[in-house]
Amino acid sequence: WFIASPYRVWNLYIGGSSRANCGTLTAAFINSLAAQGWQFIPTWVGPQAACSTIPGVTKMSYDTATAFNQGTAEADAALNVAFNLGLPLPDKTGTVIYYDLEAYDTSNSACRNAAKSFISGWTSQLRARGNTVGVYGATCSSAISDFALIANVPDQIWAAWWHYSGYNADASVWNLLCLDNTLWAIS
């Protein structure tokens, strides 16, 4: 598939309490994919927003201090799993891990503030441990732009915007709804 695919990067849902059953990942399997030429986007799917309506997911606290601490704990858990999969360096530095925050009721200010606090804790802990921090979510319904204004701003975002129905070589990360082009720069 690598030879015939337009893609060269594979999103790896490495774990988290809200991760769907995507099969078991092992360091050997990831090493074999890397040997084929694949690169990876490690993604953690832990607690979702306190007001999430997704059935069966765990949820972060509405309390912002608790949510911050939950974000910190999730960062540690994600980094341990990433380490066991061989993704960071031996000292657990040098990787990126994205947090998958699915859509939630962004009109609920208490829920939105808790999500911001959670992502701030996530970012603070992963960065303190020498890693690059990412967040994945829908531009509007995950309020991705909020994370440009928190104490610990993620290094990268992966903005979900379902504008195309299939592969589009001309797809762009610019001019997306609910996300100003100036919030994260390309480096």
Image (spheres, grey):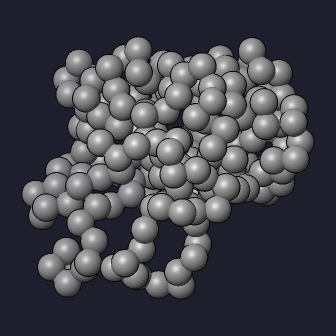
Q: Is residue 147 above or below residue 161?
A: above
User: Could one spot residue 19 in this view of the protein?
Assistant: no
Q: Residue furthest left?
A: 35
Q: Is residue 32 left or right of residue 134?
A: left
Count of numbered badges drawn on the protein: 0
User: Of 124 and 21, which appears nearest the observer?
Assistant: 124
Q: Residue at x 47, y 84 (%)?
A: 166
| Residue drawn where x is 79% and y is 57% of the image | 55
Vertical order, 115 against 25 (above or below): above
Q: Is residue 154 above or below residue 17?
A: above
> Which quadrant would residue 187 be assigned to in this image?
top left
Considering depth in this image, is 6 or 107 the residue closer to the camera?
107
Q: Residue at x 25, y 29 (%)?
A: 94
Front residue of 153/4: it is 153
In this orientation, which residue lies closer to the viewer: 134 or 91? 134
Q: Residue 31 location in percent, x, y?
A: 17, 50
Please tell me which residue is depicted at 32% across the width and 61% down the height of the picture: 10
Q: Is residue 47 left or right of residue 122?
A: right
Q: Quadrant of the N terminus?
A: bottom left
Tell me residue 89's x, y (percent): 20, 28
Looking at the image, can residue 7 be seen? yes
Rendering coords of residue 92 (x, y %): 28, 23
What x and y, as percent, mark residue 46?
61, 40
